[in-house]
């Protein structure tokens, strides 16, 4: 029988496993700086040689990276879900925009449903805190802040769903959204009536999750992203009408 004696685990392997899980679960994010070697060894209650061995292993495997005179950081392990040529193709066709929204509606509705069931008290507090910041940004009428908090709010819900594959996939997808590949979120927050509706929708999502009501959380996300889709259609129609009006004006002035 191919059984072997069980060997006590090296201390460095325990350190590696803990940091791996923090990265896998999205607690340690790409680009985030780890505490100093001294602080980390104290917090984990391990020797500094064992910690160095563990960090070196994680760097060799591409999970951590060292920046000269700056410390150890979580590597950008996400990358892009799509090749640059495909990203460029997405940015040129409206069909991709609406497919993206449909994809988000399906995945985020599931995430909200799961968050309402599985979120820890800490997860719920994070979501509630971000929503409170959204309300404050709304009063200041800063579209850039509202757009940034919008992304944080949705990602907090995905994190609270406790599905690691969904988390890392959606982080990559939201990175494309931040780059403006699909649409400019800030433009939506510049329209007063749209801003009011979006805040109300986020309030409904937050309330359903805080109440741990999975069905209501799913419905609130679906309604929100349905509204986003309609708003984008209306924006596109208005932009086309404006372009036609400009062309007519240019034609009249050159006659």
Image: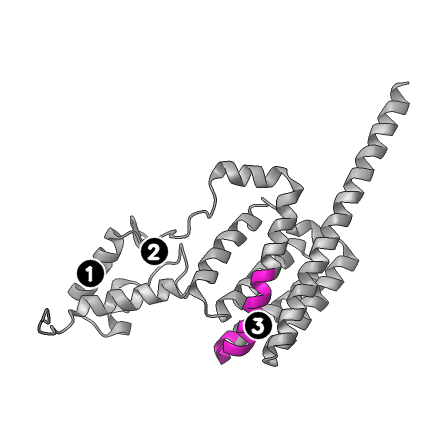
Query: In the rendered view, would you say 15 is above or below 194?
Result: below
Q: Earlier in the sequence, mark 2 or mark 3?
A: 2
Q: Position of residue 234 (x, y in %)?
A: 78, 49
Nearer to us: label 1 or label 3 = 3
Q: Residues within 10 Å of mark 2 (few under 14, many from 20)?
A: many
Q: Name the secondary structure under disc 1.
A: helix
Dividing the image into 4 quarters, which one contains the C terminus? Answer: top right
The reply to whether residue 189 is in sight is no
Camera-nearest residue between 184 and 143: 184
Question: Quarter of the image holding residue 196?
Answer: bottom right
Q: Which numbered circle lies on residue 73?
A: 2
Q: Position of residue 210 (x, y in %)?
A: 59, 78
Q: Position of residue 56 (x, y in %)?
A: 21, 56
Task: Please state if 15 lies on the left or on the right of 141 as rendered.
Answer: left
Q: Position of residue 226 (x, y in %)?
A: 70, 59
- Residue to which mark 1 is pinned: 52
Q: Residue at x 47, y 56 (%)?
A: 169
Camera-nearest residue between 51 and 219: 219
Q: What is the spatial separation of the Cα atoms under label 1 and label 3, in whole angstroms?
A: 41 Å
State the extent of the magenta-drawn residues as a range: 106-123
Nearer to us: label 2 or label 3 = 3
Q: What is the spatial separation of the Cα atoms under label 2 and label 1, in whole angstroms?
A: 14 Å
Q: Is residue 208 magenta?
A: no
Q: Name the secondary structure under disc 2.
A: strand
């Amino acid at each position: 029988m191919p059984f072997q004696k069980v060997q006590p685990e090296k201390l460095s392997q325990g350190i590696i496993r803990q940091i791996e899980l923090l990265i896998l679960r999205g607690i340690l994010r790409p680009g985030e700086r780890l505490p100093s070697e001294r602080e980390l060894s104290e917090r984990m209650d391990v020797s500094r040689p064992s910690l160095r061995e563990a960090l070196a292993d994680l760097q060799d495997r591409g999970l951590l990276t060292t920046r000269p005179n700056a410390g150890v950081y979580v590597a950008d392990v996400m990358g892009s879900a799509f090749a640059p040529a495909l990203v460029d193709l997405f940015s040129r066709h409206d069909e991709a925009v609406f497919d993206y929204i449909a994809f988000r509606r399906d995945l985020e509705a599931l995430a909200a449903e799961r968050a309402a069931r599985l979120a820890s008290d800490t997860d719920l507090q994070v979501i509630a805190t971000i929503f409170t910041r959204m309300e404050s940004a709304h009063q200041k009428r800063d579209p850039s802040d509202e757009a940034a908090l919008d992304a944080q709010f949705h990602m907090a819900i995905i994190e609270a769903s406790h599905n690691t594959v969904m988390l890392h996939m959606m982080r990559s997808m939201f990175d494309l959204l931040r780059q403006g590949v699909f649409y400019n979120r800030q433009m939506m927050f510049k329209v007063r009536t749209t801003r009011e509706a979006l805040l109300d929708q986020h309030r409904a999502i937050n309330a359903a999750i805080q109440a741990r009501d999975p069905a209501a959380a799913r419905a609130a996300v679906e309604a929100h992203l349905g509204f986003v889709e309609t708003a984008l259609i209306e924006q596109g129609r208005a932009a086309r009408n404006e372009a036609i009006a400009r062309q007519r004006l240019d034609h009249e002035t050159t006659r």
